[in-house]
Amino acid sequence: MNDIVLITPPDVLYNDTYSILIITPSTSIKNSLHEILTDTPVPINVYLFSDGDNDIAWLCNVLKMADITIFDLDNANLIVKEFSSYIIAQPKTFYLTVNQNLPYNLISKNRIYDFAWLENILFNRGKNE
């Protein structure tokens, strides 16, 4: 197990550690990510924007800073949903949704269904350091 630092609004950590922003994750997504992150060989900053958070300025700031963003669109509150197309349009954002009717695939091809890709990124990063 490596160093995992959990950061929530309004805090920001300015360092060179690999950073992941997680936006409105469900409990099952939190559990899946926890399993991957506890086994990763590199230190990680995890920025968490939960369903009850509403500091959109913080979210936009961290969205630009993070190396990867994971967005659970189905669990987002109304405030976050207003910004969902902006969030999804970011090249480092990967999003999850069960809704087949939303046309977000026109904005981004980064729709995900599991976290195997994240595990590969983190473990390959650990090999290079």
Image (tube, rainbow, N blue to C red):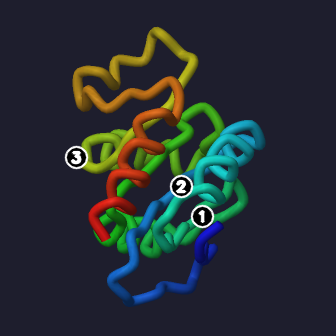
Q: Amino acid at mark 1?
A: Leu
Q: Residues within 10 Å of mark 1 (few under 14, many from 20)?
A: many
The picture places residue 52, in percent across and down from the top left corner, at 72, 59
Looking at this view, is 56 or 93 the one in front?
A: 93
Q: Name the residue located 36 percent from the left edge and 66 percent from the top edge.
A: 66
Q: Tell me where residue 101 sits by quadrant.
A: top left
Against 91, residue 38 (above or below) is below
Q: Describe residue 63's horizontal placement relative to residue 97 as left or right.
A: left
For residue 22, the mark is: 2
Q: Secondary structure at mark 2?
A: strand
Q: Describe residue 51's horizontal placement relative to residue 23 as left or right.
A: right
Q: Quadrant of the C terminus?
A: bottom left
Against 42, residue 72 (above or below) is above
- Upstream in the sequence, badge 3 or badge 2? 2
For residue 48, the mark is: 1
Report the residue that reaches farthest toward the top. Answer: 101
Q: Mark 3 highlights which residue?
A: 91
Q: Amino acid at mark 3?
A: Pro
Looking at this view, is 29 or 121 the one in front?
A: 121
Q: Name the residue located 40 percent from the left edge and 42 percent from the top edge.
A: 120
Q: Describe residue 84's horizontal placement relative to residue 23 as left or right.
A: left
**Cα gap from disc 1 to disc 2, whole angstroms:** 5 Å
Q: Name the residue located 52 percent from the left edge and 50 percent from the top edge.
A: 80
The answer to whether residue 7 shows anywhere in this view is: no
- Kindly indicate whether the residue at mark 2 contacts the one at mark 1 (C-beta within 8 angstroms): yes
Q: Amino acid at mark 2?
A: Ile
Against 119, residue 113 (above or below) is above
Q: Residues within 10 Å of mark 2 (few under 14, many from 20)?
A: many
**Cα gap from disc 1 to disc 3, whole angstroms:** 19 Å
